[in-house]
Image (spheres, rainbow, N blue to C red):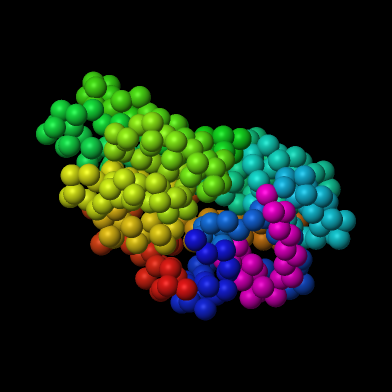
Amino acid sequence: MHKNSKFIAGLAFTALLTAIPFTQAQAGLRICFGFQDLETEFWVAGHLAITQTLREQGVEVLEYNANEDPNRQLEQVRECIAQGVDGIIIIPQDGDSAVTIVKEAQANDIPIAVFNRPPNDRSSGIVVVADNVSATEQAVEFMAQQALVKWQVTGKTIQPLILVGALQDTNAIGRRDGFFNVINRYNEAYPGMFAEPIEVATEWDAATALANLEAAITANPDVDFIFTSSDFLFPTIRSVLEPRGKWVPRGNPNHVFMGGLDGDATACMLIEQGFVDATGVQDLFLEAELTLNALLEAIQAGQTRPNEVLLDPGFALTAANIQFNRNDMWGCVLYDQGFLDK
């Protein structure tokens, strides 16, 4: 995992951003961009897409990193409001704090857009969000199809495990719901195929995930179906499975069916290598386009309190379709341009 956007800036990924049909900004605009720590490839790439596109249009971008502190982010947004910015974009820490920040901006008649991590109340502000339930279901459905074949051949119950994100985040809730939707559907159609899923708390933190996953696998060494609510935890999963001889590619009898969600470069590499079966993809390029266009159009129209939800339907990149659909996944674009070699 790389946190430094300089790793991306020199890549041809930049050219892809210029091809996205963004709304042209008015000269002299000032946009406040508040975000939490850029802890995953998705946030790094999203940050770059937004800041670079605005600056190329002559927009002044005021950047604020709250370092995963929602109270600090609220104070930063208030500072932006005091400076009289034309608009605000935020990546909030969680769905609760996002509601408070959107209300603060709208009370001061400043249009605000929330990128990817939606408020728990989506009735206010511009909210750009991935359909986490759908994207997860598409990835887990592919995994379940592969597991069904094994179950029908061996008769051995499949033991699933999910690494759950921070459940105060609506993204994490949607991903958990999508996972259980598929597991429950298959158990209805094929009684006894799946055992009761094991839930491992991660709080979106690699150290927490490592400790809890290590304990879960030690207690349940027969786990053979793992879904991570974020692709950034694949290295953590590898560190737990590899010493146990369970980090092996598709086709090996000890292969653990594996999937995730985000669509980062590591996931692309691991699907190609056979270790991961599928990932639900958040369409970074589409989400950046939706965010910037909606906010700039609101500013140009003088709409100080725009309210709309813009949905990224997402899709699944799998071992079966990667040769056809890899260029649609932002992480594969980075991977093919050498991002993981930096």
Q: How many marks?
A: 0
Which residue is at a point 87% across and 56% down the rendered structure image?
Answer: 82
Q: Image point 47% across, 73% down: which residue?
A: 342
Looking at the image, residue 39 sits to the left or right of residue 185; the answer is right
Relative to the observer, which residue lies in front, 72 or 242?
242
Compared across the picture, whether 330 is left or right of 194 comes to right
Residue 337 occupies quadrant: bottom left
The picture quadrant where one finds residue 301 is bottom right
Asked if the stretch drawn in magenta spans residue 61, the answer is yes
Of residues 8 and 112, the one drawn nearer to the viewer in this rendering: 8
Q: In this view, does 335 lie to the left or right of 252?
A: right
Q: Which residue is drawn at 38% across and 64% down?
A: 332
Vertical position of residue 117 compared to residue 223: above or below:
below
Q: Which of 275 and 245 is in front in this view?
A: 245
Measured along the vertical axis of the image, is residue 325 above or below residue 238? below
Question: For residue 265, what is the image quadrant?
Answer: bottom left
Q: Residue 5 in the image: x percent, y percent?
A: 58, 69
Q: Which residue is drawn at 22% across and 51% down?
A: 250
Give residue 279's position: percent from left, percent from top. 37, 49
Residue range corresponding to the magenta coloring? 47-68
Q: Is residue 99 magenta?
A: no
**Residue 161 vs residue 122, the one in the foreground:** 161
Residue 178 in view here:
no
Observer able to see residue 291: yes
Question: Where residue 251 sits in the image (x, y, percent)?
Answer: 17, 50
Left or right of 109 on screen, residue 151: left
Horizontal and vertical percent position of residue 56: 63, 76
- Residue farthest to the left? 153
